Amino acid sequence: MPKLLIDGKEVDVPAEYTLLQACETAGAEIPRFCYHERLSIAGNCRMCLVELKGSPKPVASCAWNVRDCRPGPKGEPPEVSTRSPMVKKAREGVMEFLLINHPLDCPICDQGGECDLQDQAMAYGVDSSRFHENKRAVEDKYLGPLVKTSMNRCIHCTRCVRFITEVAGVADLGAIGRGEDMEITTYLEHAMRSELQGNVVDLCPVGALTAKPWAMQYRPWEFAKTQSVDVMDGVGSAIRVDSRGREVMRILPRINDDVNEEWISDKTRHVVDGLRAQRLDRPYLRGADGKLRAVSWREALAAVKARIEAASPERIGAIAGEVASVEEMFALKLLMKQLGSPNIDVREDGSPLHPRFGRASYLFNTTIAGIEEADAILLVGVNPRWDGAVLNARIRKRWRMGNLRIGLIGARADLTYPYEYLGAGGPSLASLSAGEGEFASAFREAKKPLLILGRGALTGEGGLAQLVLAAKAAKAFDLVCEGWNGLSVLSATASLVGGLDIGFVPADTGMSARAMAKSGALDCVYLLGADAIDIETGAFVIYQGTHGDRGAHRADVILPGAAYTEKSGTYVNTEGRVQMSDRAVFPPGEGRDDWAILRGLSGTLGKPLPFDSMAQLRKVLYEHHPHLAAIGAITREDAAPTISALAGVEAAGSDAPYAPGLHDYYLSNAIARASRVMAECSKLALAGTSIAAE
């Protein structure tokens, strides 16, 4: 590796490094506005100037490669200075020019306290300006309901333009004009059409782009910051929950290169107001007049006890919803076991995924980061842009690297990258497995092929047959080999993998979720935040959840639980990574932790569960499922037996096209449906200005 002398310190760095990266490797701090590690290099702001010996003027370290540095006359390593008088004067000059037109908005700017321009003006600027001319004025732009603009503050770093174009894949932002007349705009003044657009607020180094739903509501130093995990999809993005008092004020991404890098979807970020609206804050019981009335916890639990004791065990069932944590599902499973009921299920959508086939049959085995190694991708019954927006950005990232062929079987969609459309349903997958078509040849020749199976294929008619077809394709194309497992299932909900891991599925004699929902199938149904399934008439419904949504409307007894920001819980993402969230705030009113509600109910029934605290619950959980104790890790298993077992299963197929997936991306769960911001996004989407209408 080339050697460099940086501030008198000799370092070895790769030739492909920029000078900025080399300087940071040596421990030097380089200011920047336009440079970002995950975006292309623009070299706009010139704040990263350093002195390179032999160069007549300072060079932009972000745009100068190490390989372009010339050695000294006697072969000495190139010398770089980051603290010389020349560098100091150059940075002060750049900062002075940046501030010529920047308004004095700091006291009223939402970016105040988190502003790169403030910080770097203090560190590298001067205390006065030599310019007294009128400042430039730029009209604010309409970017939609999520991003607020104050374009007078824009310093033309173009981070937002590069992110929307390169990462999000929607060319909605660009620059018009030159020099002082340059403006960032959507050209036609329409809302941005990306489900990742909120990330431009994090990228903006000044206050030009801020979050519109949170405008003028907070100062960043007012917050308590809590690390947590996103539950809006199965990706399990790392997030930070900022709260003030008893309210969650905003949600921001945390860096996790293995999962979400540093991006989150707009639904993850802006579902905050849904955590406050339509909340269930006390128990309710439906009276003889058919109306719900508020009651005490004792009265609600007594009503539940009376109905459960009146029903035979085989006429009792439990369904877990899509945002349930592992701990509460495990507690509910133990309670149903003590009651003697075999009817439990976490698969509201009716998918055939089951732990009896092996853990590799329902995981994203390639891992999210492993997508970057794939050289051919086949999407089967999945729209990753809806089911895992951040994961879709990772696929686009791999496509931008080049030498990647992507095929799609299922409903057509705009995925932000080109693909070959191969058919609409199972017959197309069967034909491909038989080697028919040009894509089949390319897929067979790929060194690391990846097949992503989604709920569009699994939840329709003959879902098990599609899972078997995928296993047969895995054998036909050698998707599982040394160091590579190319058969991946994309789980679209946060609870699915965790529920399957602990066996929250019906026993051999038990009913599936859809069977339990049929009229007259059961006498008593326990819904643990299950809002995506309609329970028909005949059953007594106990709903334990957070919002007055579909499940609560059907319920005969409502037990108010805690949202994901209001409890500590374990979640297992689609790739099998075990992650834990922390409590940021407490539930409103008389809401309680979900595991505590189940423990209290078990005591009322005279069948107390073997724990009295979360620590004790987790101890029992880890005794039954040791891999859940490895927080942040993925437990591997040999996938070959799973593939062979699945490929040998006999299942009736269907020639019907795969289901298109989500009807409305922005209103996919109870929290999102309670959000005014998500409702506005949904309205724009259905009007044809966003992905859900495509």
Image: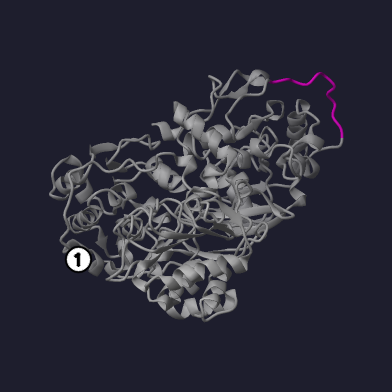
Point 52% across, 30% down: residue: 192
Q: Nearer the viewer, residue 491 or 182?
A: 491
Q: Position of residue 352 (x, y in %)?
A: 29, 58
Identify the image quadrant of residue 405. Answer: top left
Identity of the residue furthest to the right in this view: 128
Left or right: 207, with 615 as reference point:
right
Mark 1 nearby-residue class (10 Å; few <14, some 14–19, many ≥20): some
Q: Nearer the viewer, residue 45 or 683?
A: 683
Residue 294: percent from left, percent from top: 62, 56
Residue 40, position in %: x, y?
A: 52, 38
Using the image, determine if residue 132 lies above or below residue 622.
Answer: above
Which residue is found at the position 56% from the left and 55% from the top? Answer: 546
Asked if residue 631 shows in the view, the reply is no
Residue 595 magenta-highlighted: no
Residue that mark 1 sits on: 644
Q: Is residue 402 visible?
A: yes
